[in-house]
Amino acid sequence: MKAAIYARTAHHDSSTKEQIELCREYILEKGGEVVGIYDDPGTSAHQLLRDGLSLLLDDARKGKFDTLVLTSYDRLFRDSLKIEDFIDELEQLGISIITVKQL
C-alpha cells in the first residue's frame, strides 16, 4: 500500500498532528508506506478551495498513491454529496479510502 494521509482542522489553534499520527500508525501496522501527507489546519470543511486538498487531488491524478487514509469523512467535507463526488473521483483513479476513526 502506497498511502497518502489527509488531515484538517476547523480552528487555527488546533493541530492536525494527532490525526496524522493516527493515520501513520494505521498505515505502518498494515505494512504500508506513507508517500504523502496533506493537511489543511484552520480550514472549514465548507471551504472548497484548500491548498492541501488541491495538492492531494493533483498527486492522486498523477498516480502517486493507491490509498487515502484519514480519520473520518468529515475531514473532507460536511456536505455528503461533495464527499460522494470526491470518493467517486478517487475510485475512478483506482484509489481506495480508509477511515481509521469516526470522530
Image: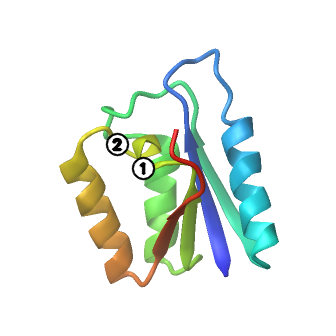
Specify the quadrant of the image occupied by residue 5.
bottom right
| 10 w.r.t. 71: above or below | above
Spatial CA distance of label 1 from label 2 is: 7 Å
Amino acid beneath label 1: Tyr
Q: Residue at x 32, y 81 (%)?
A: 92
**Which residue has dot 2 on it?**
77
Q: Nearer the viewer, mark 1 or mark 2?
A: 1
Q: Residue at x 28, y 70 (%)?
A: 88
Q: Is residue 77 left or right of residue 25?
A: left
Amino acid beneath label 2: Phe
**Disc ID at residue 73:** 1
Are discs 1 and 2 less than 8 Å apart at CB?
Answer: yes
Residue at disc 2, secondary structure:
loop
| 17 w.r.t. 22: above or below | above
Residue 20, image x, y percentages: 70, 47
Residue most toward the left? 81
**Disc ID at residue 7:** none
Viewer-side residue, 66 vs 102 = 102
Residue at disc 1, secondary structure:
helix
Residue most toward the front? 102
Tell me the crowding category of disc 2: few under 14, some 14 to 19, or many 20 or more residues within 10 angstroms, Cα based: some
Q: Residue at x 58, y 44 (%)?
A: 7
Tell how many labels: 2
Q: Residue at x 51, y 59 (%)?
A: 56
Residue 50, image x, y percentages: 43, 40
Q: Which quadrant is the N terminus positioned in? A: bottom right
Specify the quadrant of the image occupied by residue 57.
bottom left
Q: Is residue 47 left or right of residue 9?
A: left
Residue 83, image x, y percentages: 29, 53
Residue most toward the top? 13
